[in-house]
Image (cartoon, grey):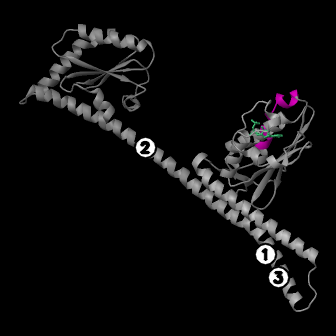
Amino acid sequence: MEVLLQGLTQPEVPLKLLLFIDKRPQSREQIRQIRHHLQQLDGDHACSLDIIDISEQPYLVEHFRLVATPALIKIAPAPQQKLTGSDIIPQIEYWWPRWQNEVEAALELETKGQDPQNQAQCVQQSTHTSVAHSAELMQLSDEIFRLRQAKEELEAQLQFKDHIIAMLAHDLRNPLTAASIAVETLELGHHSAKKGMVTINSKLTAQLLNHAKNQIRAINRMITDILQAARGAGAELQIQPQGFKLQDLCAEVLANLGSKVLDKGQQVTSDLPQDLPLVYADPAQVRQVLVNLLDNAIKYTPEGGSIDLTALHRTTQKVQISIHDTGPGIPLENCDRIFEESFRLKRDHAKDGYGIGLALCQRIIRAHYGQIWVDSVPGEGSYFHFTLPVYR
Ligand code: ADP
């Protein structure tokens, strides 16, 4: 136990005292007075005084079960004794002659047939070792507790990943099936044409090709999201997912909007179906997303405008939340860029903000393997959507 070894610097002194203090300004004066007083006291046996700052040596505080400072502890000779309170000096005065006698008695008892100097050292050494041992045990049990917690967190994260992989595999199947059907229909048409049979016309061919292309784009987008989530999720955000009722969280966040909405005379409505399945997410992080999006809706929507929050069970695997406002909307070319760190539309530079709210929302939603995006008709308003996994 390194901390203790530093403190117990004079093992040969038979009367050994520890003074526990804290960082309050008066502590220095208390140390000075106690040290001075000890120097004035008469006695055959010298004492050593080690000063211990409780904030730096918490294990010793625990070991000696201290609840207040200053505290003076006689650790040798045995038995240990604790003096606390504002009158430590008078207490030392009282106990000093008794401590001297204790040292005398301990040395006499232990020195029968042995070298006194050597015995004094033995008494010191055993006290020293037992305190060090006990503090070390406490430190180790703290370490075990922390490791156990870390293990549980890792297990939860792994379980979350399994859940998400199953969900994404399922989600990928939809566009993949749709694209395959389109391609297979085109192939059938091609074979029929070769055999001189009735075939699909060019308009339908173009539609099927377009459909297949869109589905492949959707697959590509999903894979990009997965890769970004896998890169960013674990590294930056610690997600602690659990099953919870999203509609309750939404209702709570809406109820806390308070005066901001009233000040601007805005209408806030919501549609939160009670039969929405539980979502599997980190409630604190999702709250942050809701707060950021609603704050933006209020900030960018002019006075008298309206804001609407809806929740929708979009697929068996996902719940979608949408926040609609009647603000200025987002130009199409910036719909992706507004999620970048520090990006703000020029038109909004005069408004408060740093351009980090949406970037954070995106990080959080991606860490949940969900999606976040905006649909907007410039001049008419914006729809911010995000999805979260359903809890199973
Ligand atoms: P901030 O609001 O602090 O600037 P955000 O990251 O939350 O940062 O938003 C980035 C930019 O996106 C904003 O500066 C604004 O130009 C635009 N924006 C965000 N939400 C809305 C909204 N509801 N309506 C119109 N523009 C918005």
**Contact, mark 1 vs mark 2 (Cβ under 8 Å):** no
- Residue 384 in the image, given as x and y percentages of width and height: 81, 47
Q: Label 1's element?
A: helix
The quarter of the picture where the C terminus appears is bottom right
**Contact, mark 3 vs mark 1 (Cβ under 8 Å):** no
* Residue pictured at 73% horizontal, 42% vertical: 358
Span shown in magenta: 249-263
Kindly report the distance in space between the C-alpha atoms of the residues bearing marks 2 and 3: 64 Å
Query: In which image quadrant can residue 284 be found?
Result: top right
Kind of residue at disc 3:
Glu
The residue pinned by badge 1 equals 180
130 with respect to 268 (left or right): left
Would the CB of label 2 be found within 8 Å of ligand 1?
Answer: no
Ligand 1 occupies quarter: top right
Name the front one of labels 1 and 2: 1
Type of secondary structure dominating the magenta stretch? helix
Kindly report the distance in space between the C-alpha atoms of the residues bearing marks 1 and 2: 54 Å
Kind of residue at disc 1:
Ser
- Residue 282 in the image, given as x and y percentages of width and height: 67, 47
* Residue pictured at 14% horizontal, 24% vertical: 107
Could you say which disc has been placed on residue 143 in the image?
Answer: 2
Ranked by sequence position, the earlier of labels 2 and 3 is 2
49 with respect to 369 (left or right): left
Kind of residue at disc 2:
Glu
Camera sees residue 274:
no
* Residue pictured at 73% horizontal, 66% vertical: 172
| Identity of the residue furthest to the left in this view | 113
Could you say which disc has been placed on residue 187 in the image?
Answer: 3
Query: In which image quadrant can residue 339 be found?
Result: top right
Give 296 or 190, whichever is nearer the viewer: 190
